[in-house]
Amino acid sequence: MRPSLTKYVITRLVIISIFITIIYGIALIVVPYNYQTYLFHIGLFISLLLIIIAIIYRGIKKITRELKLVKNYLSGVDNFNSSNPQAEFFTYEFEEINIQLIQILRKINRRDKQKRKYTAKIKLKNRQRSDMLSAIAHEFRNPISSIIGYAQTINEDENIPPNLRRKFLTKIYKNGEKIEELLSRLLLWNKFESGEYKLQISRFDIVVLIGDIKLSLEDRYKKRKIDIPKESLIVNGDRALIEIVIKNLIENALKYSKGVVTIKIEGNKISIIDRGIGISTQNIDRVTKKFFRTEKNSWDNSMGLGLAIVKQILKLHNSSLEIKSKENKGSIFSFTI
């Protein structure tokens, strides 16, 4: 066990006192009495004083080395080799300071790492918020501009033909529906993010649900064909959310392909198949990330949330989205329920 600083100093003083006493005694014994003059005693005193100064100087040098070791710890504890015998502290207090400094420096390093991680997260959140606001502005601009344009034309031209008026009103209605859909996606994603959404589990025929979605989308995409299965498949799940999943996947297929979109059922696996532009290898794992948008095309035409919402809904149902795709050949989006 290492001594305390007080014990160390007292021990050194006792040793010095004993050492000087011995030297002084030996000098008195060895030197004949006739030579023990005042000059002898003065010289002996000066010699002993020089010895004391040398011992004190040596002690100061040792303490200086200790302080340099403390400085080394402060400048970088990782560069200190604790196995080096020359680096060992010689008192309990310095050893305690050594240990505490190591602990403090490690805590500071951990806090710095946590601070850097937190700062990086804040920057990412701010960038995502900026991207989201930009995407919202982009997605809302077109339908709002269309609504204003058609409404202004109807308002300014009282003699507009009835057929053209009905066409413009239909355009206004459809653009209003698009804005409502965008807002619904934002609200739904916000509920997912905050953990507020609670599943409403029910038992239903998913083929009937697919048929309803087909009628809705074929009315919007009048020149397109959606091939759906005829067999029935009863499943348990949140019907409203599963409808969002299937509608998103079919609509993506309609947007990015020209041929027939096929829905296939194998057991409990539902697949949406298209023969469109496909997804590049580097993007296939990124298309389901929130706010993801490519420069070439956007697999989600609603602020980069469509497939992210699909992924989250399937996760709530203990399922996942499987994507197989080849550029210029088509894609297959599959999930089980």
Image: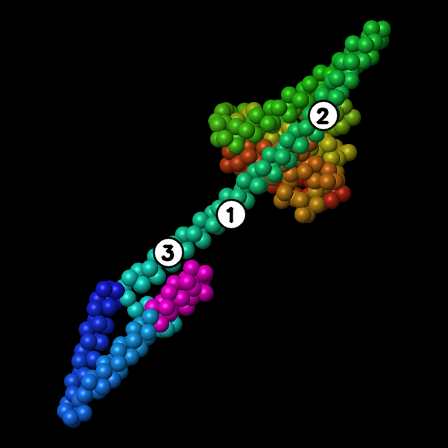
Question: For the N terminus, which image quadrant?
Answer: bottom left
Which mark's residue is nearer the viewer, 3 or 2? 3
Q: Is residue 78 magenta?
A: yes
Q: Which residues are magenta?
A: 61-83
Q: Amino acid at mark 1?
A: Arg
**Residue 284's spot in the image, x, y percent?**
65, 44
Q: Is residue 335 visible?
A: no
Q: Nearer the viewer, residue 335 or 124?
A: 124
Q: Is residue 247 magenta?
A: no
Name the residue beneath numbered marker 1.
116
- Which residue occupies 41% across, 68% down? 81
Name the residue beneath numbered marker 2.
141
Task: Name the outermost residue toward the top.
Answer: 158
Q: Distance of mark 1 from mark 2, alpha carbons?
A: 37 Å
Tell me: residue 209, above or below residue 172.
below
Circle 2 sits in a helix, a strand or a loop, which is it? helix
**Residue 256's spot in the image, x, y percent?**
74, 35
Q: Nearer the viewer, residue 170 or 202?
A: 170
Circle 3 sits in a helix, a strand or a loop, which is it? helix
Q: Tag 3 or tag 1, which sits nearer the N-term?
A: 3
- Which residue occupies 59% across, 32% down? 309
Q: Main secondary structure of the magenta part?
A: helix
Q: Which label number is shown at residue 82?
A: none
Q: Tag 2 or tag 3, which sits nearer the N-term?
A: 3
Circle 1 sits in a helix, a strand or a loop, which is it? helix
Which mark's residue is nearer the viewer, 1 or 2? 1
Q: Amino acid at mark 3?
A: Gln
Q: Nearer the viewer, residue 85 or 72?
A: 72
Instruction: Evaluate if marks 1 and 3 touch, with contact meaning CB atoms under 8 Å apart.
Output: no
Q: Amino acid at mark 2?
A: Arg
- Which residue occupies 70% across, 29% down? 138
